[in-house]
Amino acid sequence: MIQPGDLIASLGSWLRGFLLSLGLAPGLVSVGLGLLPAILLPLIGLMMAIPLIWLERKWVARLQDRIGPNRVGPFGIFQVFADMVKIFTKEDLIPQGADKIIFSLAPVLAIAGVVGIWAVLPFAADVYGVNLDVGVLYVIAVGTFGTLAILLAGWSSNNKYALLGAYRAVAQLITYEVPMVLTLLVPVLLAGSMGLNDIVRAQDSGWFVLLAPLAAIIFMIAAQAEVGRAPFDLLEAESELVAGFNIEYSGMKFGFFYVAEFLHSFTFGALGAAFFLGGWLGPGSERFPILGVLYFLIKSLAVYFVFVWTRGTFPRVRIDQMINLSWKLLTPTALGLVALMAVAERATQGTPPLVHALVLLAANLFVLFFALLVMRSMSRAARERLASRQAGSGSGMVAVGGSRAPAGAASALRD
Amino acid sequence: MLASRGEEKMVPLSWYLVFSAALFSLGLFGVLARRNAVAILLGIELMVNAVNVNLVAFWRYLAPTRMGGQVFVVVVFAVAAAEAAVGLALIISFARLGRSVDADQADLLHG
Amino acid sequence: MSLAQVLFLIVAAVGLLSGLMVVTVRNLLHAALWLIVALFSVAVLFAMLNAGFLAVVQVVVYIGAIAILIIFAIMLTRREALRAGAQENRLWPVAGVLCALVFLGLAWSASRLPGAQSGPAQLPGSDALVALGTALVSPDQYVVPFEVASVLLLAALIGSVVIAGDRLRSR
Amino acid sequence: MNPWIFVGVFLLVASAVPGFALLFAKYLGPRKPTPIKSETYECGVETHGPTWVQFKAQYYVYALVFVVFDVELVFLFPWAIVYRRLPFFVALEGALFLLILAGGLAYVWSKGALEWA
């Protein structure tokens, strides 16, 4: 029987012994070892982009009945490396009239805004960067750097399309941040803590996706929009804005925006796994941290796959539909959900877990049902207004914007 | 915990206070010297932040057991957000009137 | 000098320098970006003061929301701003002297404050975040300011939409 | 150790690595700037007029609503972690807070400030 040793802990103790044998001061060694993950983890996070890009390209290709990269190496697994070589050796172009420093700063901010989240990701019971007591808010705070990066990129490029793309992008990101923050309140409510590892531990008795499926769904939609991928890829709509905010970027700088997008999607997958799918929890994960990491990766990839699936399947929505979906459907629904969940959770405190879970589930279904009911009546009214307008052509001005949207929202949700 | 490793020399409270005083004065200079209304608002934000640093420093150094200092900062955040929202709305509205964003020109109510 | 002091001096220097840039740079958008740097260094100071929640909220609220609102407003009023002539008031040297006096007065009174040279107090062992949450919602503590703040924000929302909304719409 | 030291080092590394990569790529790649090459890219058409096109003011209204919502929601997090230890009406207090928010949303919606057009 192999000793159930923690690989990372034993590695750490070996390293500590090695460094102490070199004659370094014990205090210095423990500080250095404490900060070692802070140096390694961002590197690991960045490196994760390499397999992810290959994986996603293959996945999307299969979903769309294509083959995907297949030239460089078996199954094209070395495609990303070839791309890296290409991107490293490309000329570093800065368009005329650009704000040079800000132009170069934006891609760095974009990467930092994604990789920074990895500092609080709980990979296993004892494998995490740091368990901040404000972890959830930290995730939101780091995410704001991504928004800032896009605004800076669009502004500094001295290009109309880049600027337009940046406006759109920022409008989309801030619009979807509201339902995102609201749904993140739900795991915090249920776990009674903002630390990501505490939230994972709180799901020992039941994954939060079972207690709050509606919150998980809203989280998924908002996350897809926050990353800016189809059907919410308006910020780089090729057919309208050429390439959006990163139009003037080439070479390594473009590469960073590209990497940031892929990593962002996966990071939201990991967050979804931690918030709703029980993170590293699973049989034997407490004793074997490596199993916990494995569970966490599998769950993250599962959520990530849903993101990729969505991306590969849906056409792009119109901008008014996109805005309306958030303000008029997701935000009110999430507001009602959080309020109802708080009351239901508090009211069923002390009852058996099954009753507790069933009450919360019922609250979710009630909110979902109510939202769908309101949406149906609204889209019916919109259809009637549209029909009457077509019948009596030009019989006065009719406000269309708001009414057309719920119909779009309805179809987005139904699928 | 940087500030509580007993033996080391701490950052004294006065450093925070001096920093906050300097930031406050810079903000005040921005408010007094700038003409553009948005720039004046930037100065106000600096002043508000200086006050927040003071509040948190006093909380940490003098009364970490009572949460009044932090609650005060939370309320200041809310007020700052409200101030920025209304202030910028006023400035934009004024600019849209075809005038300027020069604070000296805002004399519509001037008899 | 200890590590904490060096760290504080670096952060403070960055904050003050960017604060200076905010009030002197001609390009308003650059001023807003410098403001973001200043706000971030204040957030770092909050973290150094063991107020993690406030540090994170500073980033979320100030950098993520207010700074973006300001940048949008600058972009919206850019044409009007270009039309204006000088950036500074004629009396800006007077203002500079005045502000220097204010700084000296504040710094002097700060250094004379009892306990100004003291180190930080012992942190309570309990969770500061829980204490803050309890303080915010307990009726015998700060629930009234908390709810009033939310009503204030609601009023600000309504007010600014009334002020800006119609004018923006009619264009 | 203050956990924020870890976060600080982490963020520093996370932004230094791409920074160095950018520098590296800059010296690795060729550099032959020509006026044509550094022109603003608009799919081949020459750019016309100033870059600073007047943008849709509606974006500003969304930013406005967002600011108010963001600030209020952030303050709900401390409530969310303590409300279970406190009496029942504290949960209702948070719900009241959310109701105020919902009122704001309803007002803005009915005012038509959320319409895209």
Image (spheres, rainbow, N blue to C red):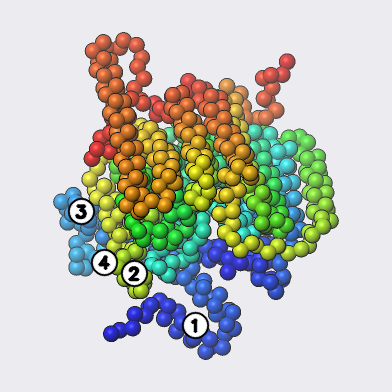
N-term mark: 4 or 1: 1
The residue where tag 4 is placed is: A78
Residue D82 x %, y %: 52, 51
Q: Nearer the viewer, mark 4 or mark 3?
A: 3
Residue A285's disc is 2
The residue where tag 3 is placed is: A61
Q: Is residue D67 left or right of residue A303?
A: right
N-term mark: 2 or 1: 1
Q: Nearer the viewer, mark 1 or mark 3?
A: 1
The residue where tag 1 is placed is: A16
Task: Read off the chain for label 2.
Answer: A
N-term mark: 4 or 3: 3
Distance between the Cα atoms at labels 2 and 3? 34 Å
Distance between the Cα atoms at labels 4 and 1? 36 Å
Placement of A65 over or under D111, stated as above or below: below
Q: Quadrant of residue A397?
A: top left
Q: Is residue A95 left or right of residue C49?
A: left
Distance between the Cα atoms at labels 2 and 4? 33 Å
Q: Nearer the viewer, mark 4 or mark 1?
A: 1
